[in-house]
Amino acid sequence: MMTETTPKTSTYGMLAVVLGFLSFAAVIGHFFVGPLDPPPPLETSLADKAASIRDATVAALKGEDYEAEPTVRARTLDDYLTYSFIGLGLVAILLGVIGFVRREHLRPSVAGVALGGMAIAFQVATTLFFALLIAFLIATVLDQLDFSF
């Protein structure tokens, strides 16, 4: 006769729920708080672009090839927080799967995986939404411009 043993505790599943909840709550909180590092002043960005355009124009007038200097965007606190929240969601998913494999109670394992997955999915969905919004706005502006010559 085969007996199935079920652990009395759901340690991994409960850890997955706690970490999944923390990651999802942190992602939602960070989204509504907004960027914690202020963006660079608009004047600085515009001055850098104007200087780049000037250099490209001068090079084109001289008949030279112009290669812009590659600018590496510095990582900000918001980037590190985003990576940390995604990592926390992945750990919640991993702990939920371990709890499932160890035959712990099913509900905490599934809830931990779901919460961790929702935290990661929210990050991806908001990024995709705003990318599509920007593309739509650019298409709308370009549609309103008159390009007849």
Image (tube, helix red, strand yellow):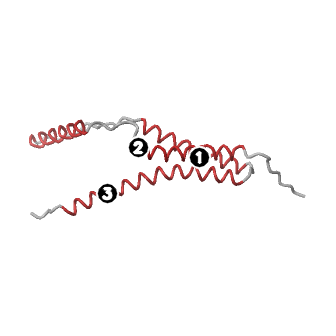
Quarter holding residue 74: top left
Q: Secondary structure at mark 3?
A: helix
In front here: 34 or 90?
Answer: 34
* Residue carrying label 3: 135
Res 65 quadrant in image: top left
- Rendering coords of residue 118 (x, y %): 54, 52
Check disc 2: other Cα within 10 Å, few if <14, some if 14-19, many if 20+.
few
Q: Is residue 140 left or right of residue 79?
A: left
What residue is drawn where x is 50% and y is 53%?
121
Give the left or right position of residue 38, taking residue 68 as reference. Answer: right
Sequence-first disc among 1 and 2:
1
Q: How many marks?
A: 3
Residue beneath the point at 15% across and 63% down = 146
Query: Which percent across, then down, holds residue 55?
Result: 15, 38
Residue, disc 2: 34
Q: Which quadrant of the figure contains the N terminus?
A: bottom right
As displayed, is residue 3 above or below residue 56?
below
Mark 1, residue position: 21
Residue type at the position of mark 3: Ala
- The amino acid marked with disc number 1 is Phe
Alpha-carbon distance for marks 1 and 2?
20 Å
